[in-house]
Image (tube, grey):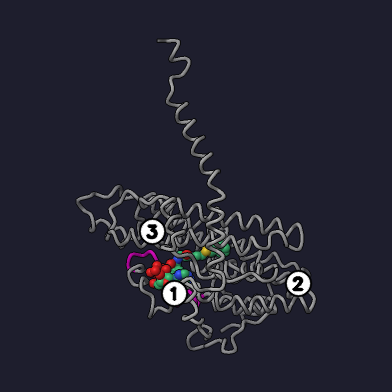
Amino acid sequence: MADTTSVVLHSLPTDSHHCNTGRVYGNDFADPDQPPGSGLLDEVADAERELRARNAQDVGAGDAGAGSDYFAALVAADQKIEPRDWMPDGYRATLIRQMAQHAHSEIIGMQPEANWITRAPSLKRKAILLAKVQDEAGHGLYLYAATETLGVSRDALYELLLGGKQKYSSIFNYPTLTWADIGAIGWLVDGAAIVNQVPLCRCSYGPYARAMIRICKEESFHQRQGFEILHTLAHGTPQQKAMAQDAVDRWWYPSLAMFGPPDTDSTHSAQSMAWKIKRFSNDDLRQRFVDMCAQQATVLGLTLPDPDLRWNPERGAYDYTPPDYAELMEVIRGNGPCNRQRMAHHRAAHEDGAWVREAASAYAAKRAARAAAPQPSELTHV
Ligand code: BYC
C-alpha cells in the first residue's frame, strides 16, 4: 500500500487548525491510489448522472400482463422500478421495512444530538448543530414520503414505530455524554451512515434512490462537521484531547455494528441484493468504513480502540476486531442503554404535537371547503 497517511496529511492546510478545507476527510476523501474523482461524493454524483440518463430512456409503464417478467427485466437492466410498476409483494414489503426503518432512524437520531443544542460551546457550534438536527428531520420526511409511494401512509408507519413493530438503527440507543460525542457522532455515525447510503443511491426503487442522492449530499456536511469538532478538540488542551479520545472509544464499536449482523447471519441480504435494493453486503460496507476511518484517525491524532487494527497487504484492507454482535442483537431487541428513553421521548413528542396535526387538518379542510364553494363571480352569473 502507498503511504496514504502522508498523502492525507499533505492535503491538510498546514497553517489552519480549524481544518475545514481540503479534501482530506469524510466523504471527500479519495484513496490516493485511485484516480481523482473516486471519492464517495463522486459516487453520488455518478449515481445521479446515471439516474437522469436512465430517466431519459424510460421504457414506460409496466404492462400488467407482463408482470414479473417486466419487473425482472427492469432490475436486470439497472432501470428503476417506479410506484406505478408491478412489483413482487416481497419486494414491496422489503422496501417498506427498510425504508421505514431508515426514516424512523433519522427521526429518533435527532434525540442524542438535540441533547447538546442548549449546551453547545459557542453560538457557531449551536447554529451548526441546530442545522444538522433539522437536516435529520428533513431526511426523515423525504424517506417517509418515499415510503408512502409504496402504498402505506405515514400515520401507519408512525403507529408501527410507536407500537414497537418497526425498528430504528441500534446506534441511537447509546447516550451522548460529552460535547465530544457530537464530534464522534458526526465523524463515525454519519460516516458509517454515508458509507452504507451511497450505494443506496443506486437502489432499484426510484423514489428511494432519488431520496438517497439528496440525503448523501447533506450527510457529507454532517460528517465534516463531526470531523472538525474532533480535530479541534484533539488539537486543544490535553483534557479536550482526552475527551475526544474517550468519545471515539465509546462510539467506535456501536458504529461498526450499524452495518448489521455479519453476512453469515444476515436474513435479508441475499434477496435484497438480488433485487438490487442493497448493492453490497453488510460486511463489505463495514470493511470499507474501517479502511476509511483507519486513515482519518491518523489525521485526527486519535486512535481507534482496536489493538488488532492493522493493514493487511494480502487482502488490501485493514484487519479489525468485529463488534460484539450479541450486544447488537440485545440493542435491537430493545435492551440498549437508551431504548426506553428514546421511545418514551418520541411518544411524548408525538402526543405534544397532536394540536399541530389537528390545526393543520382543520386548515386543510377549510381551504378545501373554500375551494369547493361557488366563487362570487359564478354567483353573479346565476
Ligand atoms: N439497527 O438481514 P439484515 C442516520 C436488523 S440514520 C437495528 O442484515 P438488512 C443518522 C434488520 O432490520 C441511518 N436493526 O437486514 C440519523 C433485520 O431485522 P428485521 C440508518 C438492525 O435490512 C440521524 C435484522 O437485523 N440507516 O444516518 O438487509 C443522525 C437482520 O439484518 C440493524 C439505515 O437505515 C441495526 N444497525 O440490512 C445521524 C440504512 N442492522 O427487519 C445519522 C438503510 C440490522 O428482519 N438500511 N438490523 O426484523 C440498511 O441499509 C439495512 O436495513 C441494514 C440492515 C444494513 C441496516
Q: Quadrant of residue 51?
A: bottom left
Whether residue 224 is visible, yes or no, is: yes
Sequence-first disc among 2 and 3: 2
**Which segment did they paint magenta?**
274-288
Q: Is residue 122 magenta?
A: no
Identify the residue under disc 2. Answer: 14
Mark toward the start of the polypeptide (3 vs 1): 3
Instruction: Quote the CA–CA distance across marks 3 and 1.
Output: 19 Å
Residue depicted at 38% across the width and 75% down the height: 266
Q: Amino acid at mark 2?
A: Thr
> Measured along the vertical axis of the image, is residue 81 above or below residue 230?
above
- Residue at the location (36% across, 56% down)? 80
Q: CA distance from mark 2 to mark 3?
A: 47 Å
Q: Residue 70 occupies which quadrant of the picture?
A: bottom left
Q: Residues within 10 Å of mark 1 (few under 14, many from 20)?
A: many
Compared across the picture, whether 371 is left or right of 75 comes to right
